[in-house]
């Protein structure tokens, strides 16, 4: 089976940005508000069949979040945020979990809304790039997840049927898009997340990437 991993929040820990947001706004929880606003923008663009690179959305969403705390985000802050996004650490269980999957014969790729150059930097700086067989970006498809095009790009390039691939993500919207494209799905409930209540349940739910690996290896052993 082809394991298709989302990157931000799924493999990499965005909590590493909390100090940046604390310095900028006085409130580390502003990081979550910024990410939610960025995803809201991405979903609106995708629903309207429009596209903007994810990094542009990240930068554009910083000033309004700072303004809600009475602060001003400058172009320098936006550049610093972009640089920090390239240097996020992996969640602690990720390296060993992916190593286990690869040892069992699973092919491991990533699919992210970030542009390819950013994704490559992120995985390399987190020490994960040697474990990833291929890095895919929604930018290559000209549509952000959860539109079907990014998922189809991976399946067509890898020459894999949807039923032979699983999308692993900590985002409900990503899981929904992958399921609509025919992939199996694994939802990471890290941070007390839960699947969307009005959408079909994911194929697997797991607490972290290690739990996903354990469930996939058990299913693989059972045939």
Image (cartoon, rainbow, N blue to C red):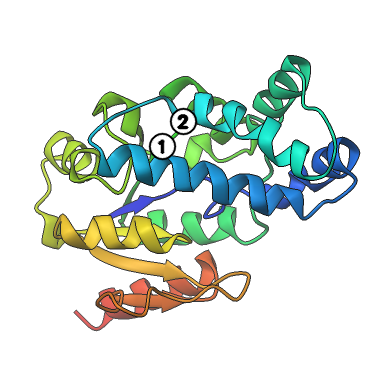
Q: Residue at x 54, y 69 (%)?
A: 208
Q: Is residue 103 above or below residue 39?
A: below
Mark found first going from the N terminus, 2 or 1: 2
| Local secondary structure at mark 1 | loop
- Residue 102 location (% of width, % of height): 39, 54
**Is residue 60 visible in the rendered structure shown here?**
yes
Instruction: Kindly indicate the quadrant of the structure image that contains residue 133.
Output: top left
Spatial CA distance of label 2 from label 1 is: 6 Å
From the top left corner, tell me how far across and down residue 27 is, in percent.
85, 50
Q: Are there few (<14), some (14-19), or many (20+) residues within 10 Å of tag 2? A: many
Which of the pair 70/112 is nearer the observer?
70
Helix, strand or loop status at disc 2 = helix
Q: Which quarter of the picture shows residue 96?
A: bottom right
Tell whether 16 sits left or right of 189. Answer: right
Q: Is residue 13 visible in this depiction of the protein?
A: no
Answer with the quarter of the image where residue 21 lies.
top right
- The residue singled out by tag 1 in the image is 113
Residue 54, which numbered label? 2
Q: Nearer the viewer, residue 137 or 218?
A: 137
Q: Quadrant of the C terminus?
A: bottom left
Which circle, 2 or 1, is nearer the viewer?
A: 2
What x and y, as percent, mark residue 154? 22, 40
């Amino acid at each position: 089976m082809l394991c298709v991993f989302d990157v931000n929040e799924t493999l990499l820990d965005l909590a590493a940005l909390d100090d940046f947001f604390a310095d900028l706004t006085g409130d580390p929880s502003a990081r979550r508000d910024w990410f939610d606003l960025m995803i809201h923008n991405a979903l609106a663009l995708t629903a309207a069949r429009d596209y903007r690179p994810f990094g542009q959305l990240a930068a554009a969403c910083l000033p309004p979040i700072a303004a809600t705390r009475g602060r001003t985000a400058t172009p320098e802050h936006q550049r610093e945020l972009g640089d920090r996004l390239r240097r996020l650490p992996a969640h602690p269980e990720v390296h060993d979990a992916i190593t286990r999957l690869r040892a069992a014969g699973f092919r491991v790729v990533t699919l992210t809304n970030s542009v390819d150059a950013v994704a490559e930097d992120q995985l390399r700086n987190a020490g994960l790039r040697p474990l990833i067989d291929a890095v895919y970006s929604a930018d290559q498809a000209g549509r952000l997840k959860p539109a079907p095009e990014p998922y189809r790009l991976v399946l067509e390039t890898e020459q894999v049927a949807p039923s032979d691939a699983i999308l692993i993500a900590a985002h409900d919207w990503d899981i929904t898009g992958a399921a609509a494209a025919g992939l199996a799905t694994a939802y990471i409930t890290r941070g007390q997340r839960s699947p969307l209540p009005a959408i079909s349940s994911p194929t697997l739910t797991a607490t972290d990437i290690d739990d996903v690996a354990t469930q996939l290896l058990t299913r693989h052993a059972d045939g």
